[in-house]
Image (cartoon, grey):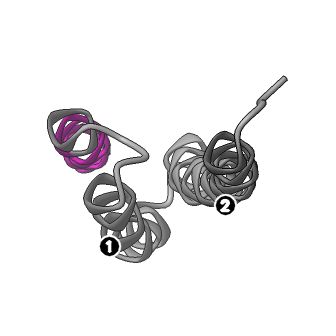
């Protein structure tokens, strides 16, 4: 357990940040899941709409340090590729 006053404060701050980060990560996963569900249903329009909503959320998580910048870009790229492939198959 933290002994000094500054260590106790750091522990409190870390606890708060953990809760905020957990909520942000959960929010990103929800948006990504909505895109994946739209892709699974085969609806390209719905998938495009869901991706347009998810993209800023994913990039915001990268800017806040929840995801690495390259990880966020990779997620967006792969979702876009899957949506594009959806149009090719139909």
Where 80 sits versus 53, above or below?
above
Please report the residue visible at 75 percent of the width from the left and 45 percent of the height from the top. 8
Image quadrant of residue 88? top left
60 sits to left or right of 74: right
Magenta span contains residue 39:
no
Q: Magenta segment, principal secondary structure?
A: helix
Where 74 sits versus 58, above or below?
above
Please report the residue visible at 32 percent of the width from the left and 65 percent of the height from the top. 55
Instruction: Look at the image and tell me whether residue 19 can be seen.
Output: yes
Q: Residues within 10 Å of mark 2 (few under 14, many from 20)?
A: few
Q: Nearer the viewer, residue 8 or 40?
A: 8
Q: Nearer the viewer, residue 81 or 30?
A: 30
Q: Nearer the viewer, residue 48 or 85?
A: 48
Please report the residue visible at 44 percent of the width from the left and 62 percent of the height from the top. 47
Q: Which mark is residue 56?
A: 1
> Mark 1 or mark 2, which is nearer the start of the sequence?
2
Q: Residues within 10 Å of mark 1 (few under 14, many from 20)?
A: few
Region in magenta: 73-87
Q: Position of residue 11 (x, y in %)?
A: 71, 43
Secondary element under disc 1, as helix, strand or loop, is helix
38 sits to left or right of 65: right
């Amino acid at each position: 357990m933290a002994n000094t006053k500054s260590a106790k404060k750091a522990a409190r701050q870390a606890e708060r940040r953990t809760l905020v980060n957990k909520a942000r990560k959960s929010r990103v996963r929800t948006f990504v899941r909505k895109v994946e569900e739209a892709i699974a249903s085969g609806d390209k329009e719905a998938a495009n709409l869901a991706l347009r909503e998810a993209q800023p959320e994913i990039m915001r998580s990268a800017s806040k340090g929840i995801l690495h910048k390259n990880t966020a870009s990779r997620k967006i790229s792969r979702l876009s590729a899957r949506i594009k492939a959806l149009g090719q198959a139909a």
